[in-house]
């Protein structure tokens, strides 16, 4: 007999979204099962787009909900809410098989009011939801959210004509800018003939200028002529004169949303967590349990609700044949012939706690060279002192501060593997299709910035103190730096060797 499953989640939008992996695992285990979701009416539109959900039951009161549930003949009830109201529903619904997620409400209150820590609080809500499936012996195959896991929601704003002149506002780090490139590509696909302009920092401008899907790049010089209220107004006037009819805002700052509003774009799409949420016309749910590339693409769901990930979504940097030829000549001049596999190593990072110890990078480089590979140290000019020491200790080729952004991109056409801390070059390598081995310490996969693509790997160790911050810190808050110290040279070398030798597509 096919299972008929009711899931209860009567909380906020974010909590509803985090239940998406539950339905995928239920369907994977019981393909013939039907799944109904009892949810607040305001979130019915979002929930309706979740894979695996066959029916949405809007909650309109206890009596109505209990009557509908009893009439439907459910065989299983999964309570992912865990409060008095859901307790009453499950006691009166007469469903034979019931599982309830562990909310640990008391532990939360003790922590909020008295700062009393508890191991129960170390688990993310999504993990708690999945743990509730153990009562039914449902194995966990899917743990992550994906772009197609929720719908576009309801939009009461009057319909506007299709946009012809779009602005993307992204003035964050290099990695964030890289992960915005697919957004430009998919705007072009969703709105044929639309002109796409990107507002970005001067240091990221070459990335977008090199992108075939971007028609114009405007530099946002926040530390120069566009700094302060007068500079902001000067930039806003320039944007307004260009008459954009759509602004897409992956950057979640108040300044970005304010610029879009001041530019006069009649449609402004951004994230629900934006500091400028009140200035948006369309707010898309934001969750950490999705890669940043997919989060950015989810901004287009209001324009194209049927949008799904492409099979080659992780590859969005076009090869630079001429540039790679020049890089090959430069490598040959430095003693690395074309027949030798080259490993790129990025030992730096914006924050000190995101850097694997330099002596371990040096040992890794020595071992890679002993295995017959060429090793090139990469990084910004500010990282020269760090990499000079690694080069002296290992004999690796030191190109730190000697490649601009476009040369770094061209190098991706030559290297067989990228070994890197959590950084911008990590995303550059992954986007170019280079197998990428990333070392994660204070940050975690759950923040959504891991190297995107099936061929890439992350080396990390679980600790209760991870993640300690969104971007890393200058010093370890706990004083032990175990997140990076526990990553050994042996395990990184073993991964690197396997990834270089793996057949195409098997890494």
Image (spheres, helix red, strand yellow):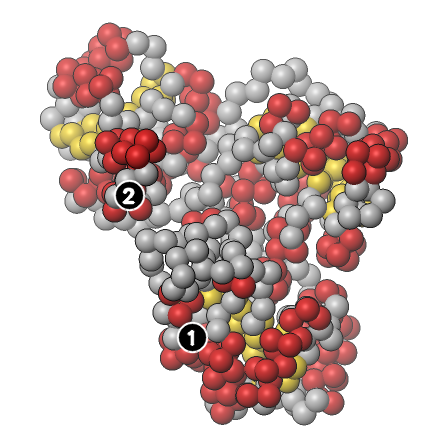
User: What residue sits right under mark 2 in the picture?
Assistant: 117
User: What residue sits right under mark 1 in the picture?
Assistant: 492
Q: Earlier in the sequence, mark 2 or mark 1?
A: 2
The percent coordinates of residue 487 (x first, y second) are 39, 70
Disc sitting over residue 187 in the figure: none
The percent coordinates of residue 499 (x first, y second) are 46, 74
Q: Does 438 appear above or below 97?
A: below
The percent coordinates of residue 201 (x first, y second) are 75, 50
Picture quarter with the C terminus: bottom left
Residue at 48% over, 73% down: 357
Picture quarter with the N terminus: top left
Foreground residue, 432 or 351?
351
Give how far apart the Cα atoms at labels 2 and 1 are: 33 Å
Q: Quadrant of residue 166?
A: top right
Q: Quadrant of residue 37?
A: top left
Foreground residue, 210 or 31?
210
The answer to whether residue 482 is visible is yes
Specify whether 432 is left or right of 50.
right
Residue at 32% over, 31% down: 113
- Mark 1 lies on a secondary structure that is helix
**Which one is closest to the eye, mark 2 or mark 1?**
2
Specify whether 137 is left or right of 173.
left
Q: Does 187 appear above or below 355?
A: above
The answer to whether residue 342 is visible is no
Q: Residues within 10 Å of mark 2 (few under 14, many from 20)?
A: few
Residue at 58% over, 15% down: 156
Foreground residue, 449 or 193?
449
Residue at 41% over, 64% down: 481
Q: Quadrant of residue 431?
A: bottom right
């Amino acid at each position: 007999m096919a299972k008929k499953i009711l899931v209860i989640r009567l909380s906020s939008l974010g909590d509803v979204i985090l239940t998406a992996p539950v339905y995928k695992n239920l369907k994977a285990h019981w393909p013939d099962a039907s799944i109904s979701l009892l949810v607040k009416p305001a979130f019915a539109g979002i929930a309706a787009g979740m894979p695996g959900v066959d029916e949405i039951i809007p909650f309109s009161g206890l009596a109505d909900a209990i009557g509908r549930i009893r009439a439907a003949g459910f065989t299983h009830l999964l309570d992912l809410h865990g409060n008095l109201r859901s307790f009453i529903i499950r006691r009166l619904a007469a469903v034979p098989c019931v599982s309830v997620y562990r909310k640990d409400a008391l532990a939360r209150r003790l922590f909020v009011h008295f700062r009393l820590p508890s191991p129960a609080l170390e688990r993310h809500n999504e993990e708690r939801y999945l743990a509730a499936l153990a009562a039914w012996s449902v194995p966990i195959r899917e743990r992550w959210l994906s772009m197609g896991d929720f719908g576009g929601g309801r939009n009461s704003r009057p319909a506007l004509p299709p946009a012809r002149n779009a602005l993307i506002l992204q003035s964050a780090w290099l990695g964030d800018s890289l992960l915005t490139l697919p957004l430009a590509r998919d705007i072009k696909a969703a709105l044929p003939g639309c002109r796409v302009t990107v507002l970005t920092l001067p240091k990221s401008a070459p990335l977008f200028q090199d992108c075939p899907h971007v028609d114009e790049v405007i530099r946002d010089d926040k530390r120069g002529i566009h700094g302060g209220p007068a500079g902001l107004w000067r930039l806003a006037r320039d944007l307004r004169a260009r008459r954009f009819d759509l602004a897409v805002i992956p950057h979640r700052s108040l300044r970005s949303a304010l610029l879009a509003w001041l530019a006069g774009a009649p449609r402004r799409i951004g994230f629900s967590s934006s500091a400028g949420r009140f200035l948006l016309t369309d707010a898309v749910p934001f969750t950490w349990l999705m890669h940043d590339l997919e989060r950015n693409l989810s901004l287009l769901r209001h324009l194209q609700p049927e949008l799904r990930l492409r099979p080659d979504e992780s590859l969005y940097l076009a090869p630079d044949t001429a540039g790679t030829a020049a890089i090959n000549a430069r490598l040959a001049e430095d003693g690395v012939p074309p027949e030798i596999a080259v490993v790129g190593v990025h030992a730096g990072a914006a924050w000190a706690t995101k850097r694997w110890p330099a002596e371990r990078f040096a040992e890794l480089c020595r071992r890679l060279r002993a295995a017959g590979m060429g090793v090139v140290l990469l990084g910004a000019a500010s990282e020269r002192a760090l990499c000079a020491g690694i080069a002296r200790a290992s004999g690796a080729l030191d190109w730190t501060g000697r490649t601009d952004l476009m040369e770094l991109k061209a190098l991706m056409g030559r290297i067989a593997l990228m070994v890197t801390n959590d950084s911008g070059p990590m995303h550059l390598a992954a986007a170019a299709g280079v197998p990428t081995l990333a070392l994660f310490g204070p940050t975690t996969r759950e923040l959504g910035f891991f190297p995107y693509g099936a061929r890439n790997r992350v080396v990390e160790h679980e600790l209760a103190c991870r993640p300690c911050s969104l971007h890393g810190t200058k010093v370890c808050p706990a004083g032990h730096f175990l997140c990076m110290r526990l990553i050994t040279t042996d395990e990184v070398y073993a991964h690197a060797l396997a990834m270089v030798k793996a057949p195409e597509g098997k890494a």
